[in-house]
Image (cartoon, rainbow, N blue to C red):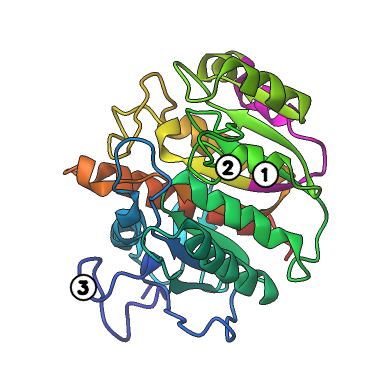
């Protein structure tokens, strides 16, 4: 026998059981997290400017992630000749932050509390949105005593700059998160990759972003630079927080999002970038946002999101993650 764990217990196929992330254990007590990774849902989309629906992102990505729950001894990649996410990597799903409809401040505070609980437990936070405004409380969670690390550099993979300061009093919508991140004293800078086409951020927002320490790289520029060139744009030895908007991908493979933008990345372009980052840097947090399953009846957008997250976690721990 192979020793993969199938010899005893249930087969537990992907469509059987409750859809936690990757079919990993559910931990509802945020004071009792004992894991290397804790997954938090942030089903908030009241920050959306156009098509809503990302509130169903965490549920959709969790269900899609069950596709990758085969096996009990990790996932073998023949190209890398590596087995990723063996049983020794403890991943738990802590459920969703409570969302109070129409109340951005309270909903964001609840998301921040969840991330702080994960950091207090010494686990790597992985947050599934929700619209991109949920990045604001995620980054804010690194301001307190729960995080005992160094300053963080934000790697944003996205179609849009999300650097609006304020519009009609709105400062915490999904067009504002990178501006709010850049304002934090413990954020050393931003690398914004995939930015393209008509943007919700005006020209002065781009100028402000560069003044506040951002490098802005389009899809075409990224392709010309290559993965090694992109990796050189990240500060050497920096601790990295990764935020992934699913609209960074071409809508031909990720149509299930509120603001699709043609000309985006394909799967391996992002995968190889994330693998390179994991090999060279300590990754201290991840969020993936803007999956809106109702716009993609095939489910491929949710599957893409789940696959990207699980592969990234595999790269992180294979490279020797240091908590």
Mark nearest the camera among 3 and 1 is 1
Disc 1 designates what residue? 181
Element type at marker 1?
Answer: helix
Distance of label 3 from label 1 (alpha carbons): 40 Å
Q: In this rendering, which labeled residue sits more in front, label 2 or label 3?
A: 2
Q: Mark 2 = which residue?
A: 177
Is residue 67 shown in magenta? no
Cα–Cα gap, marks 2 and 1 = 6 Å
Q: What's the magenta region?
A: 225-241
Q: At 73% across and 71% down in the image, what residue appears?
A: 146
In the picture, measured across the screen, residue 172 lies left or right of residue 319, that is left
Look at the numbered disc 3 and give the secondary structure of its residue. loop
Q: Mark 3 points at which residue?
A: 16
Q: Quadrant of the N terminus?
A: bottom left
Query: Based on the displayed image, in which of its 4 quarters is residue 153 positioned?
Result: top right
Q: Identify the residue at the far left of this view.
A: 297
């Amino acid at each position: 026998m192979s020793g993969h764990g199938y010899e005893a217990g249930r087969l537990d196929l992907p469509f059987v059981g409750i859809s936690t992330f990757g079919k990993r254990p559910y931990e509802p007590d945020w004071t009792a997290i004992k894991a290397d990774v804790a997954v938090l849902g942030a089903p908030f989309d009241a920050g959306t400017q156009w098509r809503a629906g990302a509130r169903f992102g965490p549920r959709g990505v969790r269900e899609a992630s069950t596709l990758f729950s085969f096996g009990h001894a990790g996932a073998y990649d023949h190209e890398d000749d590596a087995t990723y996410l063996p049983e020794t990597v403890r991943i738990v799903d802590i459920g969703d932050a409570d969302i109070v409809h129409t109340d951005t401040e309270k909903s964001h505070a609840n998301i921040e509390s969840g991330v702080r609980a994960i950091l207090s437990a010494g686990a790597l936070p992985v947050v599934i949105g929700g619209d991109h405004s949920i990045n604001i409380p995620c980054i804010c969670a690194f301001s307190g005593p729960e995080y005992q690390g160094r300053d963080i550099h934000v790697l944003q993979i996205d179609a849009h700059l999300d650097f609006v300061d304020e519009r009609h009093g709105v400062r915490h919508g999904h067009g504002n998160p990178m501006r709010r991140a850049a304002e934090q004293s413990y954020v050393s800078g931003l690398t914004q990759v995939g930015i393209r086409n008509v943007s919700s951020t005006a020209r002065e927002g781009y100028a402000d972003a560069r003044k506040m320490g951002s490098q802005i790289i389009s899809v075409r520029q990224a392709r010309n630079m290559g993965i090694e060139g992109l990796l050189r744009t990240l500060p050497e030895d920096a601790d990295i927080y990764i935020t992934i908007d699913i609209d960074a991908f071409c809508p031909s493979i990720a149509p299930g999002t509120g603001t699709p933008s043609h000309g985006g990345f394909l799967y391996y372009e992002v995968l190889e970038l994330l693998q390179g980052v994991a090999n060279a840097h300590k990754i201290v947090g991840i969020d993936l946002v803007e999956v809106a399953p109702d716009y993609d009846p095939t489910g491929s957008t949710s599957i893409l999101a789940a696959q990207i997250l699980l592969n990234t976690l595999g790269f992180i721990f294979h490279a020797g993650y240091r908590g």
